[in-house]
Amino acid sequence: MKRKINPNRMMLLRLKRRLELALRGHKLLKNKQEKLMQNFFALVRETTGLRASVEKRLIETGMHYVRGRSMTDRQSLEDALELSTKRGKLGIKTRYEMSIPIPEFSFEVPAAEPAYKLSSTSAELDRAFELLLACFPDLMDLAGKENALFRMSEELEKTRRRVNALEYVLIPDLRDTIRNIESKLSEAERSTQTRLMKIKDMVQARDEDV
């Protein structure tokens, strides 16, 4: 990217200050990028473990439900599903990690005995409801962590683009422009010295003639 500038010492000083600022910004962004990568992969490992645990528990819940359904008549099952609905309280808090807003979810369900008739349903069905209810906090935690991963990946991409823009565009462009100005100023200085020497020689020659 070519810059149309006045090759003078004031502009040279401004560009050198801008280059210094760009180098400092690049270093800070690089550090931020590295820290984000560390946090991102640590969260990936944590989320992967939690997801595996939640999936295992949901599979177990499903197995109990299938067995319970096979041991319970259709009407009793429908009654149990209708009567086992509960209202919970969803809580959302926001924490900040390296200026990234990350939501944390919580879900509370008041403890209560099953509202359906235990005599008409299988114990497997009771166990399925119990496991599903116990799994909700981890499901909310997993949702929060996966949301955090998404936001951190977006921030990583933005930071990567900024680092690359500084490293491969702005900083090389500033350095190239500074070199060009220094070259032109040096050339102008040599030209001035040459003229001064010629003037000096002319003055000396005139004095000798006199």
Image: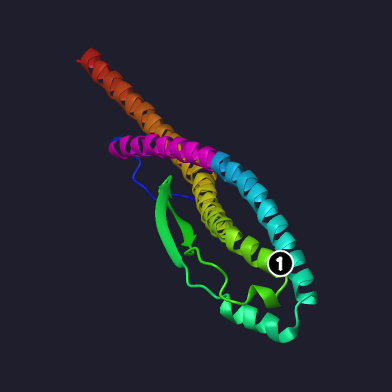
Prevailing secondary structure of the magenta residues:
helix
Asked whether residue 204 is drawn in magenta, I would say no
In the structure shown, which secondary structural element does the residue marked by tag 1 occupy? helix
Residue 59 appears at what percent x and percent y?
A: 74, 61
Tell me the residue at 68%/52% (across/down): 53
Q: Nearer the viewer, residue 30 or 94?
A: 94
Tell me the residue at 47%/64% (across/down): 110
**Vertical arrangement, residue 170 with respect to residue 27, above or below:** below
In the displayed orientation, state which residue is furthest to the top.
208
80 left or right, relative to 186: right
| Amino acid type, residue under disc 1 in the picture | Ala
In this picture, which residue range is highlighted in magenta?
A: 10-36
43 left or right, relative to 61: left
Tell me where residue 55 sits by quadrant. Answer: bottom right
In the displayed orientation, state which residue is furthest to the front.
119
Tell me the residue at 70%/69% (across/down): 125
Q: Nearer the viewer, residue 24 or 50?
A: 50
210 left or right, relative to 100: left
Asked whether residue 17 is drawn in magenta, I would say yes
Residue 5 appears at what percent x and percent y?
A: 36, 47
The residue identified by callout 1 is 123
197 left or right, relative to 59: left
